[in-house]
Amino acid sequence: MEHDNKTTTVTNPESGTTTSNFIKSIVVDDLKAGRVKEIVTRFPPEPNGYLHIGHARAIFINFEIADEFKGRTNLRFDDTNPVKEDPEFVEAIKEDVKWLGYEWDGLFFASDYFEEMYNRALLLIRKGLAYVDDQSADRIRETRGTLSQPGIDSPYRNRTVEENLDLFERMRKGEFKNGEKVLRAKIDMASPNINMRDPVLYRISHATHHNTGDEWCIYPMYAYAHPLEDAIEGVTHSLCSMEFADQRPFYDWVIRECEMEHVSRQYEFGKLFITNSISGKRHIKKLVEEGVLDGWDDPRVMTISGLRRRGYTPEAIREFIRATGISRGNGTVDARMLEHFIREDLKLKAPRTMAVLDPLKVVITNYPEDQTELLDAEVNPENPEMGVRQIPFSREIYIERDDFMENPPPKYHRLFPGNEVRLKHAYFIKCEEVVKDADGHVVELRCTYDPETKSGTGFTGRKVKGTIHWVDAKNGVPAEFRLYEPLVLDEEGAENVDEEPADALESESAVTDKGDKLRINPNSLQVVHGYVEPNMKDVAAQEKFQFFRHGYFNVDPKDSQPGRPVFNRIVSLKSSFEI
């Protein structure tokens, strides 16, 4: 049954819940028709890098659909290319999937099936459906033709079954060099689908594999291995992104001609792009190598580890993906939509506190020199159950430099000579004197306070229009703050490749690389130093806070030290974006 992109409301026969996306419609139809009895999906990353937001969408789709219909989801590593893969990436991917809130039912590796894949290739040779080709990779590409011109048969296409079996066995034994021979499917060099023009099934690679060591020197191509893996594991719905749509006929051909007992079916969903962002592995790898980023977990990129380090929560990411919906069409989403969901998630969770990012000292001249008092403040006014915190207040404090102007414009309600403002949770203060250095820069303000105006006492004698935040100078904790802007200046971000081909010979099905055209924002990171309240001296990695007026911040898990915290700004407090 064919399904379009229209919203179709369906009812899950197991749970009775209603849903509205085309994949769930397919699942419901398959269950009703009896084609499948249990839904089995899989998330199949290649361990050649870190996961990004596009992978998070693929994880969400596969796990959530299986969960809703009481099925199973496997985590499978498509490790068919030993040159690019590493155990580091395997462990990072496991961590990311768990952090997003999902548990796999089975953990598998494509390399677990190398022997069976080899035997199925022998079957294809015996059926006259595969042959060993001596042409180079470049020559194979040149002779595959174009969308308007058929391909050219290889001069080795009509080798006998016996010759192909002998050569393929010798390939496995390591008698040939890299690139000297490949095994190709024998299908149709005039097919309108270029992917059906005798695609490569195996290539030679004398490289140590992270899982099988040096047992093999021939490795299956992704497009050949993937359908076999699905069939071996009993996957019912092989869900992948749209760039694999043209591969579907070959996917079906492999399962059919390899005579797999289980028939898996592939379905494609549209990819999600986020404005002003980069998530594709090859783009990030290049920027890391060039020193633009400090690693795959740089908070400016849309890797799962980068989002986690910046301070995004799995709940916010899942809600964001749910809100974007699922269709066959690719779509671009405003980055502010993702920011909306982290604000919604943190507004009741994150403690409220004060931080000064660009400090200007204020001396309250009529406050007792040796006195420090503790002021009470709610931890989160929107969530009273979080309790009350105490803030020390004494004669010297820090305020934000931009909360003072010596010659303010009209309707400026913060601090200036002769003006009075409220200190958040504290008192009214009035600027009496401005102290400058030899170059004329303001280095200190001298103010007086009104002890009758203490916050929480019900004082109503007079009102002020401005409220500013502060940190006690005697007890404040020095801190580093990292402020982020979009990494790229372009409106649309680099593609989110949900599943990337495992090797270069399949580049015909890969998306176009736009990375070199992106304009990197030179101001994407600003590092400033200031102070936080003393109760934040020993904050733990990944703790999140809302700093008054500045936004939501996360304790950096790599660089923060006891007594010298480092905070990454997750997002500002407000946005013009509306859901």
Image: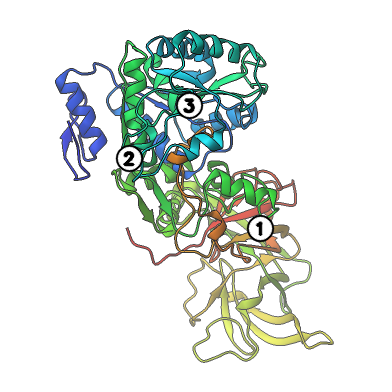
Which-is-in-front pick, marks 3 and 1? 3
Secondary structure at numbered mark 1 = loop
The residues bearing labels 3 and 2 have C-alpha atoms spaced at a distance of 39 Å
Q: Nearer the viewer, residue 69 or 419?
A: 69
Q: Which mark is residue 269?
A: 2
Q: Which residue is mark 1?
A: 533
Tags 2 and 1 in contact by the CB under 8 Å rule?
no
Q: Position of residue 578 (x, y in %)?
A: 34, 62
Q: Residue at x 60, y 82 (%)?
A: 415
How many residues crowd mark 1 within 10 Å: few (<14), some (14–19), many (20+)? many
| Residue appearing at x 52%, y 78% in the figure | 466
Going by the numbered disc 1, the residue's amino acid type is Glu
Residue 138: quadrant of the picture: top right
**Residue designated by label 3:** 155
Is 320 on the left or on the right of 11, as rendered?
A: right
Q: Quadrant of the C terminus?
A: bottom left
Q: Nearer the viewer, residue 229 or 273?
A: 229
Q: The residue tagged with tag 3: helix, strand or loop?
A: loop
Front one among 72 and 131: 131
The residue depicted at 70 percent of the width and 58 percent of the height is 480
What's the CA distance linking mark 2 and mark 1? 48 Å
In the displayed structure image, the side of residue 259 where residue 306 appears, left or right: right
- Looking at the rendered structure, the kind of residue marked 3 is Pro
Residue extending furthest toward the front: 155
Q: Is residue 542 above or below residue 200?
A: below
Hey, what amino acid is under mark 2?
Answer: Phe
Instruction: Determine the CA span between mark 3 and mark 1.
Output: 76 Å
Q: Nearer the viewer, mark 3 or mark 2?
A: 3
The image quarter in which residue 533 lies: bottom right
